[in-house]
Image (cartoon, grey):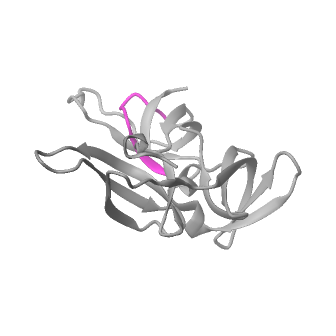
Amino acid sequence: MSELTDIKKGLLIKYNGEPYVVMEANFLRMQQRKPVMQTKLKNIKTGKVVEYSFKQGESAEPADITRHKANYLYEEKGRYAFMEQENYEQYEIEKEMVGEAAKFLKESQEVDLIFYEENIIGVELPPKVVLKVISAPPGIKGDTVSGSGKPVTLETGAVINAPLFVNEGDMVRVNTQTGEYVERA
C-alpha cells in the first residue's frame, strides 16, 4: 500500500478496482486542515482522466501490472501484431489499445506489452526511437528565424516538426512521449 507521500507522478495504482497511472500529484497542507494529495489519474484501460484528492490515512493499492518484451510484426485492418520475445507467443491488438504509439512503430521494433490481470491493456515504446525521413521540403536559405522548423514525414507516416537542416534520407531520433524531434542519428 502506498502512503499519502508515496503517491508520485508515473505511479501505477488501483483505484475503484481499475488500473490508473498518476499523471499529476500535488501535496497540499493548508492551515488547520489535514494534508491532502491532489491527483490527476488516467485509466490505463479506457484513457479516461479523473481527479481525486487522497486524504491523510488513505492509501493507494499498487496495480498488479506486468510488462513483457515483444517485437512489433505488422499492422493489418486496424489490428497490430506483436510477438513476445521469451516464448514467441503472438498477440493481435486493436488500434485503440496501441494509441499514439502507432505513429512511431516500425517492423521488428522492440516494445513493452503491458498486462493487467492477464489481459493486454497497452503498448509502451522506448522513450526515443530512430526513424528515417522519407520526405522533407527543402530549407530556404535565409529562413533562420529562431524556433522555425519544417514538417517532415517519417518512414512510419508520422509528420513531425524538424529543424531546417534535416533532409530526405536522414535518420532522426524522436521522443515517443511528446512526438518531437530530438536530434540527428
Magenta span: chief secondary structure: loop
User: Residue 78, position in %: x, y?
Assistant: 64, 71
Q: In the displayed image of the protein, which residue is found farthest to the left?
A: 31
- For residue 98, side relative to residue 55 (left or right): right
Residue 55 image point, x, y percent: 31, 55
Residue 139, percent across and down?
35, 33
The percent coordinates of residue 4 (x first, y second) are: 38, 46
Decide which of 1, 119 is in the foreground and name it: 1
168 vs 117: above or below = above
Q: Nearer the viewer, residue 140 or 121?
A: 121
- The single residue placed furthest to the right in the displayed view is 87
Q: Confirm whether the magenta stretch covers residue 165.
A: yes
The residue positioned 52% from the left and 49% from the top of the image is 1
Q: Is residue 152 visible?
A: no
Please state which of residues 59 and 173 is positioned toward the viewer in this rendering.
Answer: 59
- Relative to 125, is 167 above or below? above
Which span of residues is magenta-colored? 157-167
Q: Residue at x 62, y 50 (%)?
A: 105
